[in-house]
Image (cartoon, rainbow, N blue to C red):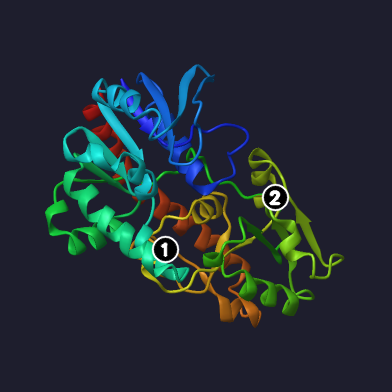
Amino acid sequence: MITVIGQHPNQFNERDGMIQRIAAIDNLIKCQKRRYLEIHFRKYWKGEHLVEDGIEVYKWNFFIYFFSILSMLISSDYIYVHSIYNSRVVFPFYFFLKNIITDLHGAVPDELEMYGQNKRAKLYSWIESKVLYHSYKIIAVTEAMENYYTDKYPFTKGKFLCISIFSKMKTLQETNRKENGVIYSGGTQKWQCIDIMKDLIANTYDIYNWTILTGDPGCFRNLNQSKIILKSVKPEEVQKYYGQNSFGIVLREDSIVNRVACPTKLIEYISNGLIPVVLCPQIGDFYKYGYKFITYRNFRDNRLPSKEEVKQMRIENYKVLESIMDKTNENIDELLRILS
C-alpha cells in the first residue's frame, strides 16, 4: 500500500499547478494500491473519509488524529510526499520511517524568498534539509533541479530520480493556425510576470491576435476587451485554442525558481506546436537541450522568424521534448520498480 501525502486530484482542483503534478504521478502509479492522506494543523477536526474514483481519501487534523496518522504511515509500504510544503505535516515521521519518497515539485525556500517571506523561507530551508537527508528517494522535475540540490546538499547524491511529467506525446501535426495568433494559458501568480505581459498585450493589440485563458479573467479586465479573446475554460478545452495559435507566452524572470522548474505550460505549448515567447530562456532543462524560442523584445518589436523558420522551430522543439521524455521514462521505470 502506498500512502500519498497531498490532495487527491478531482474536478474541483484540477486547474491547480501542484494538483496537475499530483495527478500526473497518480496516473503513473495507477496500477498500485494507494490511498490519499491530507493532513492539516487547523482543519479537519472531525476528520473526513471519502472515496473518489475508487481511491480512499482521508482528511485528518494532525493533533486530533496523530495516532491514526502514525498507524497508517507505519502500515504503508511506501509514503509518497508531494512537495516540501506537505512534508511539514509529516515532518516527525521522517526521522524513523525509512520508506518516504519526497517529490520536490519546486524550490520552496527560494519561492518564499521571491515573495519576501524571509522568515518562512528560513523555516522551510531547515525543514528541507532534514527532509531530504532522511528521504529514501527524492523526485526532481528537471535535471537542473537535481543538480541544484546535489550542489546544495551533497548528501542527496544517489537519491534522485528526475521525472518531468508530460501530457501524452502525440504526432506533431500542422493545423490551421493564425500566423499572428498568440496565446497565454495559466494563472496570475507573481512568477508569471503578469504586469509585463499586460504591458506587452497593450502595446501589440494591432500586431497580434491575443487569446488569454485563465482562471482569473478579472486580472485582465482593464485591457481592451474588443482586441482580445479572454476566457476561463475547462482543461480539456484548452488544446483546441492551442491549435488555433502560433505563439505561447511564458514569461519568467531569471531566478533559481525558474531555472529548476518544468512548467506544465511550456510543455503544453511545445507539444502543441506553439513557439514559446520568453523573458528569460533558461527555464528548466529546455535551454540545455536546445529548445527554440522567441525573446520578449523581438516579439514586442515584431521581429519574428519566417513562416518556414517557425515550422522548423516546431519540429526541433518537439525533438527536445522527446529527448527529455526518453530520460524521464527511464526514471519512471525505476520508480515503478521500487514501488512494485
Asked which secondary structure carries label 2, the reply is helix
Residue nearest the observer in this picture, 269 or 63 = 63
Determine the residue positioned at 31% across, 64% down.
Answer: 122
Which is closer to the viewer, label 1 or label 2? 1
Residue found at the far right of this picture: 226
Determine the residue positioned at 65% across, 83% down.
Answer: 301
Quadrant of res 194: bottom right
Asked which secondary structure carries label 1, the reply is helix
Determine the residue positioned at 26% across, 20% down.
Answer: 75
Horizontally, residue 205 falls left or right of residue 246, namely right
Dot label at residue 241: 2
List x then y, in percent, for residue 279.
51, 74
Residue nearest the observer in this picture, 305 or 124 = 124
List x then y, in percent, for residue 310.
57, 65
Q: Which residue is mark 1?
A: 111
List x then y, in percent, for residue 73.
28, 26
Residue 282, relative to residue 267: is it above or below?
Answer: below
User: The disc labelled 2 sits on which kind of residue?
Assistant: Tyr
Residue nearest the observer in this picture, 274 or 111 = 111
Figure quadrant of the C terminus: top left
